[in-house]
Image: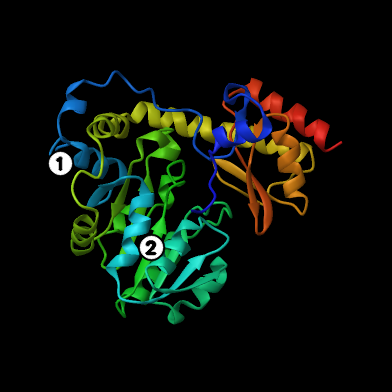
């Protein structure tokens, strides 16, 4: 099992600090969660049903011709490699490490490369996996460049897989509307933008044949009834979505100012997090943890990812802690 952010209970045990006392900036999940209403008891009593309106709400939100609900984009990440014969796979690095692990586990030859190298060497690969915007590297790609890359791969039966888990605050860059093209797969996550990580919900957007194969691989009832009930409403709540996007961008800008003010100029940024490469990343992570501030530590390259504080009080707490540990 790979390491991920959000292991707050483990951190609480390690440092002897109660979970309620932590400021958890380790996940990149928006702190501005969609307000979940009361969930009808019937959603717990009955098996989920596919014709409950969720598909239509998701198609409208993502502007995707076809999509499949999945138990978080992680479910699709693990299943997609099983749908191809052994292939040469190029994966963006540094990036979300589950992609490379899933393709390797399924018997594919995987190579990790920076974005420019992946695109320049596209002819060497049958499949290219990109994270857009990249987590944690922050890479952003031009839509036309991605479509040209897809065309290069698809012309010889290849795939372009684009993980858009962090794109909701910049939807103009999404490829969901183009995802019916053969060999293009776009993965979306509900957890990050809507702050509903516990729902374990996402969507795979692709052509009919690929989605049918993925559906057969995953089996029925990929999402629980309560999750489907909540998601259908969240995906349709345009007023909240507009407000949340503005709050994310504003909070990201304020966090960037605080980090920069302490000499932690971000190496890469999105609306959801800032990523700082530093040789002393381990020491800084530990120093903040002893003050009950939890960041996401990456060992290669040495770096920290800072998620967004929820309010000015949390931001001031981080500001004060950085002043102590970096003076």
Find residue 140 and name its label.
none
* Label 2 secondary element: strand
What residue lies at 42% left-to-right and 65% top-to-bottom?
A: 146
Residue farthest toward the top in the current orientation of the protein: 38
Earlier sequence position, callout 2 versus callout 1: 1
Residue 299: % across, % down: 66, 55
Horizontal side of residue 67 vs 144, given as left or right: left
Residue 82, percent from left and from top:
31, 66
Label 1 Cα neighbours within 10 Å, binned few <14 / some 14-19 / many ≥20: some
Residue at image coords 36%, 40%: 200
Q: Quadrant of residue 61?
A: top left
Quadrant holding the C terminus = top right
Residue 113 makes an appearance in the image: yes
The residue depicted at 59 percent of the width and 23 percent of the height is: 311
Residue 270 occupies which quadrant of the picture? Answer: top right
Query: Can you give x and y, in whole percent of width and height, for residue 125 in the image?
Result: 43, 77
**Residue 149: image location, x then y, percent:** 41, 71
The residue where tag 1 is placed is: 50
Answer with left or right where residue 22 lies relative to residue 247: right
Residue 65 in view in this figure: no
Residue that badge 2 annotates: 161
Name the residue: 76% across, 30% down.
321
* Distance between mark 2 and mark 1 Cα atoms: 25 Å
253 vs 149, left or right, is right
Residue 12, quarter of the rendered image: top right
Nearer to us in this view, 66 or 300: 300
Q: Quick check: 269 above or below 191?
A: below
- Tell me the SS state at disc 1: loop
Q: Is residue 38 above or below residue 48?
A: above
């Amino acid at each position: 099992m790979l390491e991920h952010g959000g292991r707050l209970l483990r951190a609480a045990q390690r440092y002897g600090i109660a979970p309620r006392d932590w400021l958890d900036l380790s996940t990149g999940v928006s702190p501005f969660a969609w307000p979940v209403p009361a969930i009808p008891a019937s959603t717990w009593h009955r098996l989920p049903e596919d014709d409950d309106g969720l598909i239509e709400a998701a198609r409208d939100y993502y502007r995707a011709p076809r999509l499949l609900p999945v138990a978080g984009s992680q479910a699709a990440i693990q299943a997609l490699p099983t749908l191809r014969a052994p292939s040469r796979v190029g994966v963006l690095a540094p990036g979300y490490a589950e992609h490379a692990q899933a393709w390797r586990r399924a018997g594919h030859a995987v190579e990790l490369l920076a974005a420019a190298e992946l695109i320049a060497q596209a002819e060497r690969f049958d499949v290219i996996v990109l994270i857009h915007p990249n987590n944690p590297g922050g890479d952003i790609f031009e839509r036309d460049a991605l479509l040209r890359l897809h065309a290069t791969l698809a012309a010889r039966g290849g795939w372009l897989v684009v993980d858009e888990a962090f794109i909701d605050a910049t939807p103009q860059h999404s490829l969901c509307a183009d995802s019916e093209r053969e060999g293009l797969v776009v993965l979306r996550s509900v957890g990050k933008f809507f702050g509903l990580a516990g729902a374990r919900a996402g969507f795979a957007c692709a052509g009919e044949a690929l989605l049918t194969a993925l559906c057969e691989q995953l089996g029925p009832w990929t999402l629980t009834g309560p999750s489907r009930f909540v998601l259908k409403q969240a995906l349709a709540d345009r007023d909240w979505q507009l407000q949340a996007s503005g709050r994310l961008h504003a909070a990201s800008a304020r966090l960037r100012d605080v980090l920069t003010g302490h000499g932690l100029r971000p190496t890469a940024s999105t609306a959801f997090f800032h990523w700082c490469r530093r040789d002393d990343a381990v020491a800084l992570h530990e120093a903040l943890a002893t003050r009950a501030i939890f960041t996401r530590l990456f060992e290669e390259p040495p770096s920290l990812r800072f998620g967004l504080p929820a309010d000015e009080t949390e931001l001031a707490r981080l500001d004060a802690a950085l002043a102590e540990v970096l003076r």
